Amino acid sequence: MTDNVTKVRILDEANSLIRELGMNGISYAHISSRVNIRKASIHYYFPTKDDLIRELVAYQSQIFLDEVHAIVEDGGADARTKMHRYFGLFEKAFNDGKGGSICLFGMLGAEIHSLDDQTCDIVRDFYSRNIQSIRTILAAPDTDDDAIGDTAASETAHMIFSAIEGAMIISRANRDLGGYKAVMNNLLNIIDFSK
């Protein structure tokens, strides 16, 4: 394996493990058995677990926020369609783990006090940028009128993002893939997208 391929495999396996077991529930031994390399090799790329987590969070944040940006900037979709697609990003993360894992940032939010300051900043920025993206979707006009008022959009965006993360945590605890979907469908029905 080339250096970059190995590094990405380490990050991908760490992502899967943390989403399933939490940051405090994994070790380099877990990762080495999945990637089939020695623990010392992981230390070559990531000298400490904090280094690994920090790079993983930055890496995954960029991937996810690029997908969110594509949804927000889709000029051919209305606000409801964009919101449905946005919910789908989290549903995919939840379904990939067959209900046993949740969004990396939801898991790390629960363990925020175990993270170093730089990683905390990346996690908080991820939350902030998602809330801003939801607000943009809600305020994006098809005409000159907002889907909902600007102040209400900010408050609603925070509520929606909190509901997404909370629904995944509860659905994971209940091993109920349908629970998350039901919450998202209810949110789509509660939000007034009419002009």
Image (cartoon, rainbow, N blue to C red):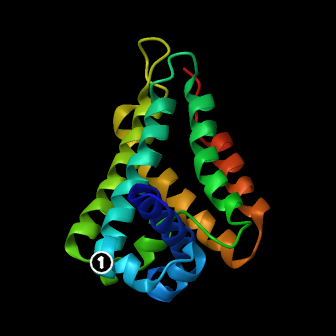
Q: Determine the residue positioned at 36% across, 72% down.
A: 53
User: Does the image show residue 194?
Assistant: yes
Q: Amino acid at mark 1?
A: Asp
From this view, report whether residue 150 is shown above or below residue 103.
above
> Can you see residue 155?
no
Badge 1: residue crowd in 10 Å (few <14, some 14–19, many ≥20)? some
Name which residue lies at 47% across and 11% down: 143
Q: Position of residue 95 (x, y in %)?
A: 71, 59
Looking at the image, the residue that sits furthest to the top is: 143
Q: Position of residue 54 (x, y in %)?
A: 31, 68
Exactly how many numbered labels are in the figure?
A: 1
State the residue lying farthest toward the left.
117
Tell me where residue 61 appears, x and y as whole percent.
Answer: 39, 53
Look at the image and tell me in which quarter the C terminus lies: top right
| Residue at 59%, 53% in the rendered image | 90
Which type of secondary structure does the marked residue at label 1 adopt? helix
Image check: 139 left or right of 49? right
Q: Report the residue that reaches farthest toward the front.
A: 1
Taking the spot 64% from the left edge, 45% from the top edge, the residue there is: 88
Q: What residue is pinned by disc 1?
A: 50
Q: Vertical placement of 31 versus 4: above or below?
A: below
Closest to the observer, 164 or 26: 26
Q: Is residue 93 above or below residue 116?
A: above
Report whether 60 appears left or right of 55: right
Give x and y (percent) for residue 56: 39, 64
Out of 81 and 95, give the one closest to the viewer: 95
